[in-house]
Image (spheres, rainbow, N blue to C red):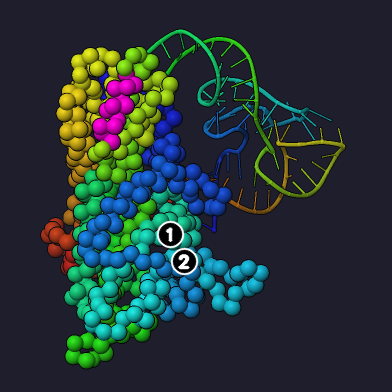
RNA sequence: CGGGGUGUGGCGCAGCUGGUAGCGCGCGACGUUUGGGACGUCGAUGCCGCAGGUUCGAAUCCUGUCACUCCGACCA
């Protein structure tokens, strides 16, 4: 059977219209429904279960690194948000504001949090007094609101779910170490759990977070070559601490300002999963976050013993995997398509013929290859098959990232690639934001993604102005 | 926020030179089927996005508004 045969007619082909394909998948896989409020999505059980699996995995990683979860209020008094100048300027344009409580106009307007730096700082001011109180390694899982102009499920919504880590340290060195450590944490998570490779590095001055001294980013590439800012980790220096008057007494009995970090990833990662791994038959979920890892499809289930055997297998596998047995009376063909559309990594077919031979059929969602395996060591075979799916997804995504990364030696070549080859462009940069503006203007949207940790010496001149280059930058279009 | 497009049963759509709503899929019951989206019979489902206006009469014409979608500008 041809693997590329498009079996799900309702999904627009990704080659025809990638954006429409994305919207179709999100809806058909029952991840999301729209609500009555612009840009706010209902995350349906199947989509939310993915988020829960992401949360569970990440939360364990954070805790292993010593972080504690807290919960901050969702409202920020306007005066509080305004304490740090760059921060307000960055977020003011997209804030939702509460002006009435009950029947009365509020004496001070309340901002629905777009991010919680200010709340954390206001709290840290009260609980940090001595070097013995440091480091403070807090994280919270919550929703935030940013009044976006155009929205798309998961990628950009007015309200979204995320985690935001906020930490305080004795000095710059420790805070910087935390910043990089958490970026590494995200990178590991993307690779090990989501099977997504990415470019990581430092944001340029122009692309930094509002109020940060340094912003680090993880930038996975979507199937169509467009980048997605997949997570960020910021070093703040002591800017917020000074603005919020957070001080501690150090080992030498001197009053000091602590150094701060913040880092976050959001439900946008679900968008990254969809656009990195999905194909024309729908979603493909990395096994570690798939709500259903194995879909058991009984064949000729009306026949004696089939459902019994299927249930037996379900019970056995449920000890180690997330399993669903579909004994509805839809046709087997319908079920095959359904679970493919929903991205279930592994399908298990069991019918009379198999039972006779003490075996069953495993089908990978990625390759659609059927493997006959013995029922005797089924759990082991399933574990191997799931791991194979994970590895295949990662390899495939890595190949895509590599194939769609070009090198531009000079200005002309840069413009040519930007025009004709979707994906990342590696090129040298002088360090001036004017050149970033110019390249973006000329190419209609190609921006600097980051200065990667490992730079290559492509040339000694800026690919825009020709002046001496300071850094190699990875460029690309973004969601 | 600019420029296109779209809102009609759960989904996809037709109806739009005004006369009180239809098709396919899905849904429910029964029967036959069952290794890649099965078939038959019967049946249920609509404040035509919302609010005004024109008219004897509006899904249809006009105005406003809300939401969705695609393309730009802005951002996780």
Q: Residue at x 25, y 88 (%)?
A: A249
Q: Nearer the viewer, residue A334 or A152?
A: A334
**Secondary element type, mark 2:** loop
Q: Quadrant of the N terminus of chain A?
A: top left
In the shown orientation, is residue A139 left or right of residue A35? Answer: left
* Residue B53 image position (x, y, % from top left): 81, 47
Q: Residue A183 lies in what quarter of the image? A: bottom left
Q: Is residue A218 left or right of residue B51?
A: left
Residue A143, numbered circle: 1
Residue A368 visible in the picture: no
Q: Which residue is mark 2?
A: A74
User: Is A191 placed left or right of A282 in the picture?
Assistant: left
Do the CB atoms of the residues marked 2 and 1 lie less than 8 Å apart? yes
Q: Residue at x 28, y 14 (%)?
A: A352
The chain carrying label 2 is: A
Q: Residue at x 17, y 33 (%)?
A: A380
Which residue corresponds to the image point at 40% horizontal and 41% vertical from the top-left?
A: A46
Helix, strand or loop: magenta stretch: helix
Instruction: Examine the image and state in which quarter residue A71 appears.
Output: bottom left
Name, please, the residue furthest toward the bottom. Answer: A253
Q: Picture coordinates of residue A73 (x, y %)?
A: 45, 68
Chain letter of the residue beneath label 1 in the structure image = A
Segment tinted magenta in the rendering: A306-318
- Marks 2 and 1 sit apart, C-alpha to C-alpha, by 8 Å
Question: How many other residues sit within 10 Å of disc 1, few (<14), some (14-19) or many (≥20)?
Answer: some
> Which quadrant holds residue A328?
top left
Q: Residue furthest left?
A: A457
């Amino acid at each position: 059977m041809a693997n590329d045969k498009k079996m799900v007619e309702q999904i627009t082909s990704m080659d025809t219209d990638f954006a429409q394909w994305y919207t179709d998948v999100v809806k058909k896989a029952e991840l999301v429904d729209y609500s009555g409020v612009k840009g706010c999505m209902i995350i349906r059980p199947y989509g939310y279960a993915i988020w829960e699996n992401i949360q569970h995995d990440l939360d364990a990683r954070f805790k292993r690194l010593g972080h504690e979860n807290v919960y901050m209020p969702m409202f920020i008094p306007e005066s509080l948000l305004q304490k740090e100048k760059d921060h307000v300027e960055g977020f003011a344009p997209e804030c939702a504001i509460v002006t009435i409580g009950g029947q009365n106009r509020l004496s001070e307007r309340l901002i629905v949090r777009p991010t919680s730096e200010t709340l954390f700082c206001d709290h840290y001011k009260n609980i940090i007094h001595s070097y013995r109180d440091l480091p403070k390694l807090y994280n919270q899982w919550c929703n935030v609101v940013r009044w976006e102009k155009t929205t798309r499920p998961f990628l950009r919504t007015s309200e979204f779910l995320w985690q935001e880590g906020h930490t305080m340290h004795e000095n710059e060195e420790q805070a910087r170490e935390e910043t990089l450590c958490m970026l590494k944490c995200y990178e590991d998570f993307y690779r090990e759990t989501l099977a997504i490779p990415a470019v990581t590095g430092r944001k340029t001055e122009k692309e930094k977070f509002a109020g940060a001294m340094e912003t680090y980013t993880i930038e996975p590439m979507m199937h169509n070559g467009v980048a997605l800012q997949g997570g960020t980790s910021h070093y703040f220096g002591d800017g917020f601490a000074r603005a919020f008057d957070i001080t501690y007494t150090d080992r030498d009995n001197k009053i000091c300002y602590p150094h701060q970090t913040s880092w976050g990833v959001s439900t946008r990662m679900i968008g990254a999963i969809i656009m990195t791994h999905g194909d024309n038959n729908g979603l493909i979920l990395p096994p570690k976050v798939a709500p259903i890892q194995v879909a058991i499809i009984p064949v000729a289930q009306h026949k004696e013993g089939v459902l019994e055997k299927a249930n037996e297998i379900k019970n056995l596998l449920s000890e180690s995997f997330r399993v669903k047995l579909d004994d509805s009376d839809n046709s087997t063909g319908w079920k095959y398509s359904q679970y493919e559309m929903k991205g279930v990594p592994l399908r298990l077919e069991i019918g009379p013929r198999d039972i006779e031979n003490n075996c069953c059929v495993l089908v990978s969602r990625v390759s659609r290859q059927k493997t006959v395996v013995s029922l005797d060591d089924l759990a082991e075979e399933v574990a191997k098959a799931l791991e194979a799916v994970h590895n295949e997804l990662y390899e495939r995504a890595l190949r895509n990232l590599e194939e769609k990364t070009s090198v531009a030696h000079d200005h002309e070549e840069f413009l040519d690639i930007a025009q004709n080859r979707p994906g990342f462009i590696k090129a040298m940069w002088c360090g001036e934001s004017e050149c970033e503006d110019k390249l973006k203007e000329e190419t209609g949207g190609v921006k600097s993604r980051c200065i990667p940790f490992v730079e290559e010496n492509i040339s000694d001149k800026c690919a825009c102005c020709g002046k001496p280059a300071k850094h190699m930058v990875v460029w690309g279009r973004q969601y």
